[in-house]
Structures are given as C-alpha cells and as structure tokens.
Amino acid sequence: MDCIPPSDFQDEKIRVGLVGKLLNATDEISSASAITSELFKKIVTCNWTKGRDLYKSVVKFKPQALHVMNANGLPPLKGGLGPADKRRFRVIPFNRRIPKEERIRHLGERIVHEETDLVLAWAVDGLLRVARNGWLFTELAASTDLIEEWQENLCPVTGWLMSGEVVFETPVVDGREQPVPKKEAYRWFKTWARGEDLRGDQPMGPNTFTMRMKATDLGPIWKHTNKGAVFLNLRQAHSDVIVLEQRANVIKLHEDHKAGA
C-alpha cells in the first residue's frame, strides 16, 4: 500500500487503503494542503468510517493504523487546532543539519540489513516503556511548544486570545459582574483581526467564532442564557485604561469650565 497523506483522507477512494493496515508512514506532507480536522480525528481515533475502491461497493471499517508523518512545516488544519486535536499530535523536531562529511549513503537500508537485531531490541524496549507509562507516549517539551505555536498560527481566535488584548476576568460594572455578550466579544475580535490584517483558514463568522472559543482550552467560559450567549470571564485588557482616560478627560473639562467661569 502506498502511504496516504492526511490531506487525502477526505477521498473515500484513497482512504480505503487504510483497511487492515497497522502503519501509515508518509515520506512528506505538504504544508500547503490543509487537513480536515473532523475526519482526521475520526481516523486516528479508530472510529467507523467509509471508503470504497473504484467501481466497488462502499465498505465500512475501523481505521487502526499508527500515522507517522514527515514534514518540513506543520500543515494547515481546517477548523483550527482544538484540545482534542492537540492530544493526538506529537511533534518531534529534528533541527540538526547533518554535515556532508558525516552523511552515510543509504543509511536506512544499511541499518535494516546489518543491524536488524538492534532495531528489533530498540522497538521492543520502546513498546515496554510505553506500556509501563499506561500506553501514553512521552510528551516532549519541544513538542508542546511547537504545537502551541502551531495552534496560534492556525487559528486567528487563538491568536487573539494569546495576543494580550483580552484577559480572562469577569467584567464588573457598578459593582456587579457583567458577562460579555457573544456579539460584543465577536466585535472585539473583528476589530483586532482587521488591525492585524488576518484572513485565517476560512471565513470567520459569528458561529465559527463561538465554536472556536468553545473549543479552545485557553480559558474563556461560555454560557447560553435567556438573553443569549455570553462569555462569563472575558474582558478587554485595555478597558480599565480607557475608563481612566475618559474620567481624566471629564475632570479636565470640568476644571477648565470652572476656570473659565
């Protein structure tokens, strides 16, 4: 079976090649071809999906392959990178460029043919280590940092939440907590996005904005009330400064008026 890059998962005539396979190792994935988040999660979590060979009937199957992907850059992900997606990715950076004098031609083939016993021992040792860890792979700090950066680059809503423009505190007006209506939060986001000249990976309407806000694990708390959807703990970071400036201007106008009188 040829390897199937995740950008081809949406083609049922291609993804049927995953039936019964335990490993899908891609040589290279494009940083220009977007991955469909919903279908990607369905495949990597072994949920039922459908596929068919050309001129044959549709088959329903549970994908079970482990997916190993090489890439020069992390690809776009339609729908953004939510908490469920982040749990399913491990990004291992290879930052060292091998000098020419250290390169060995056909190294992979030589290892397989000359050191098969060592490769097998290495694989078994890794399997035992994962088993002792409750079948969880070790989470690398470098991987976490790359995924966080990837998330911010993928989703303008995440970029806005991490920009410092908003803080996760409940606004208080005249001593009373004041949740922020969804429309108001969306207006804040659009104002910021225009200033940043962002387009994102798809049109960002109010419903998509709300979906991205609910999906993020950065801190906003969403609630549906009888007055509509609100965010309970969202406040513009510079709102206090604006209020203070407005009060200062009022005081100055009042003092100027008294002086003129």
Image (cartoon, grey):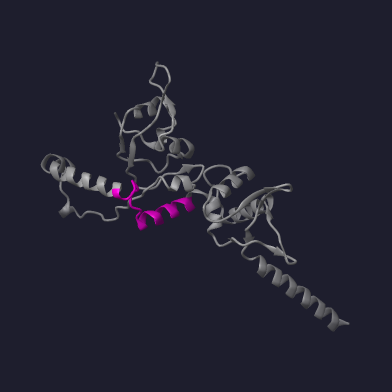
**Residue 230, image x, y percentages:** 67, 51
Q: Quadrant of residue 29?
A: top left
Q: Nearer the viewer, residue 58 or 7?
A: 58
Query: Any magenta on residue 137?
Result: yes
Residue at the (44%, 26%) spot, across then down = 50
Is residue 169 or residue 164 the one in the foreground? 169
* Image position of 255 (left or right of 169): right
x 40%, y 57%: residue: 145
Residue 250 at x, y percent in the picture: 78, 73
What span is in magenta? 132-153
Q: Please give left or right for residue 10 compared with residue 216 in the image.
A: left
Q: Position of residue 9 (x, y in %)?
A: 41, 33
Q: Residue at x 47, y 51 (%)?
A: 151
Left or right of 101: which side holds 212? Answer: right
Where the C terminus falls, by quadrant? Answer: bottom right
The N terminus, quarter of image: top left
Residue at horizontal 44 percent and vertical 29 percent from the top: 49
